[in-house]
């Protein structure tokens, strides 16, 4: 089981401080009691553009982290109003099962826009 914890803004500040002192990723990892791969990954993923004076900026790193974190969250497909109303019509008016609806959508659009469990979750009124 993985017990990974994200780097805190304080640790990111320390990384900047240690880099300014000329320490290597291995030395920084040892000083922060972190894995060397954690530090090298942080430096690689959050490196500042070449035109900036610092190679690593904790504020930029935190902003990039937040952006990546938001992007990795699952999107709620039934928030799309047209798809939601389409599914609602087939359930309430035609009494189709979620399996039939998913099959119909795949047939019409050639791809899976919604899954059966997603249709079951909102609990449409009968």
Image (spheres, rainbow, N blue to C red):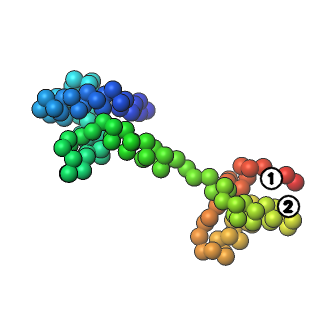
Q: Is residue 89 left or right of residue 24?
A: right
* Residue at figure coordinates x 67%, y 56% from the top left: 78
Residue 97 % position (x, y): 78, 61
Where does the image place residue 75, in percent across and percent down from the top left?
Answer: 57, 52
Query: Split into 4 quadrants, where in the image is the C terminus?
Result: bottom right
Left or right: where 112 falls relative to 91: left
Query: At which x and y percent is residue 99?
Result: 72, 62
Residues tagged 1 and 2 counted as in contact (Cβ below 8 A): yes
Residue 124's disc number: 1
Residue 27: quadrant of the picture: top left
Considering depth in this image, is 25 or 20 the residue closer to the camera?
20
Label count reads 2
| Residue 104 in the image, given as x and y percentages of width and height | 71, 71
Q: Tell me the crowding category of disc 2: few under 14, some 14 to 19, or many 20 or more residues within 10 angstroms, Cα based.
A: few
Q: Secondary structure at mark 2?
A: helix
Please state which of residues 12 and 60 is positioned toward the viewer in this rendering. Answer: 60
**Quarter of the image holding residue 98?**
bottom right
Residue 30 appears in which quarter of the rendering?
Answer: top left
Q: Nearer the viewer, residue 73 or 10?
A: 10
Residue under numbered circle 2:
92
């Amino acid at each position: 089981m993985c017990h990974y914890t994200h780097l805190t803004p304080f640790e990111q500040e320390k990384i900047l401080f240690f880099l300014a002192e000329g320490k290597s990723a291995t030395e920084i990892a040892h000083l922060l009691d972190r894995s060397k791969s954690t530090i090298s990954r942080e430096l690689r993923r959050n490196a500042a553009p070449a035109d900036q004076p610092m190679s690593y900026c904790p504020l930029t790193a935190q902003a990039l982290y937040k952006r990546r974190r938001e992007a990795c969250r699952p999107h709620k497909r039934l928030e799309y109003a047209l798809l939601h109303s389409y599914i609602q019509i087939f359930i309430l008016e035609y009494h189709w099962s979620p399996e039939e609806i998913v099959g119909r959508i795949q047939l019409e659009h050639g791809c899976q826009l919604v899954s059966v469990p997603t249709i079951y979750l909102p609990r449409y009124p009968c």
